[in-house]
Image: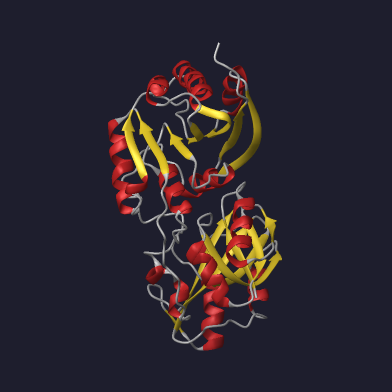
Amino acid sequence: MKAIAVTIQGLEKITQLEIKEILKLKSEVIVPSRVLFSTKSDKDLAKFIYNARSISKAYLLLDNFKFSKHEEILDKVKGIKFPYFKESFVVRCERSGNHGFNSVDVERLVGKFIYEKYKINVDLNNPHVTIFIDIVDDNCFIGVDFSGIKLSKRNYRIKLMSSSINPLVAYSMVRLSGVKTADIVLDPFCKSGEIPIECALFLNAFPNCFRLRDKLLFSKFLKIKFNDKVKPKKLNIIAMDYVQNSLRAAEINSKLGSVNKFIKFSRLEIEWLDTKFKKASVSKIITFPPFTSNNLPIEIVNKIYKELFYQAEYVLKNEGLITIISPKKELVEKYAFDYNFKKTKDVELVMGNNKFNILIFKNCGFERR
């Protein structure tokens, strides 16, 4: 059985890492943001969806091909034997790229054929099986949707800010930084708390869909039990922000995520970090600092980034890491190099029409002058 995991373009290696960790399987990036892997059973795919934190969706793959006209999709559908058909079905289509048709055109075309062939009812609201047609430019993937809900919409995300980070990205930053249980982890711009929350959930091996199992589509046609026993670990995660509303949002979200006891919250401006922490006491900084906008001019952003690396050089341990995501790669690098940090990783992400870079720098241990 083949399956596709959907993630953010640029984070495919994190998804491949999770496939290896959860299922002990190899995988390949078949197109940007789509990772292909072979499962031993449909229950393995369900297990992966239940636990994975880097994906927005996953589905059982029935066929994939290139096409030029949407009528060609129907030709391929005619040769597919659809599994799990019992009570009702629906066809859902999602597209990315430029096409001379819309998703509804594909749904109607394929849905009509399946209805006439299988004599099974269409249910738009609560179908037993969802046929998923995933179109990326001229690539078409046809499968059975096992997840349904957007897995990036974490159940803890109730209080959000305009600058909140996507949880898939927050989790991936945690993994890229190589966080371990014994680390002292700091996010000085925590906003609504995604980075420290994802860090606490990961280190405690908390299944992503623990509270979402009834909403997952595979539960309609698969009976499967999961091991939800979580052994809480002693963690040292600090979430800070200079905006009180952000800090309050992070605290509320952490309670909803059941990890508030693993995170210490503090309101503090970046220039006071060296009064809060001893020299070389922090293992890792993982953060999403402010960036230029209509309300935040470049002069202020320059000052923030300069102060961030000035403070990081002091509080980070020798060879400690700072992991930053920003749309201003050159600006981050400028101040990192000014304070003797060495770049170890650079991962480019594409989210919609926007490009970001996750940058990881190592503190080379120079004394502050």
Tell me, yes or no, if residue 106 can be seen here: no
In x, y percent, where is residue 263? 36, 43
Tell me, yes or no, if residue 25 can be seen here: yes
In x, y percent, where is residue 306? 51, 18
- In this picture, residue 263 sits left or right of residue 167: left
Name the one closer to the observer, 352 or 281: 281
Name the one closer to the observer, 207 or 69: 207
In x, y percent, where is residue 298? 48, 19
- In this picture, residue 86 sits left or right of residue 13: left
The quadrant of the rendering that contains the C terminus is top right
In x, y percent, where is residue 66? 71, 63
**For residue 128, what is the image quadrant?**
bottom left
**For residue 118, what is the image quadrant?**
bottom right
Residue drawn at x 60%, y 67% as measured from the top left: 23
* Applied colour scheme: secondary structure
Residue drawn at x 42%, y 60% as measured from the top left: 231
The quadrant of the rendering that contains the N terminus is bottom right
Residue drawn at x 36%, y 56% as measured from the top left: 155
Q: Is residue 275 above or below residue 90?
A: above
Residue drawn at x 47%, y 34% as measured from the top left: 288
Q: Is residue 82 above or below residue 49?
A: below
Name the one closer to the observer, 334 or 130: 334
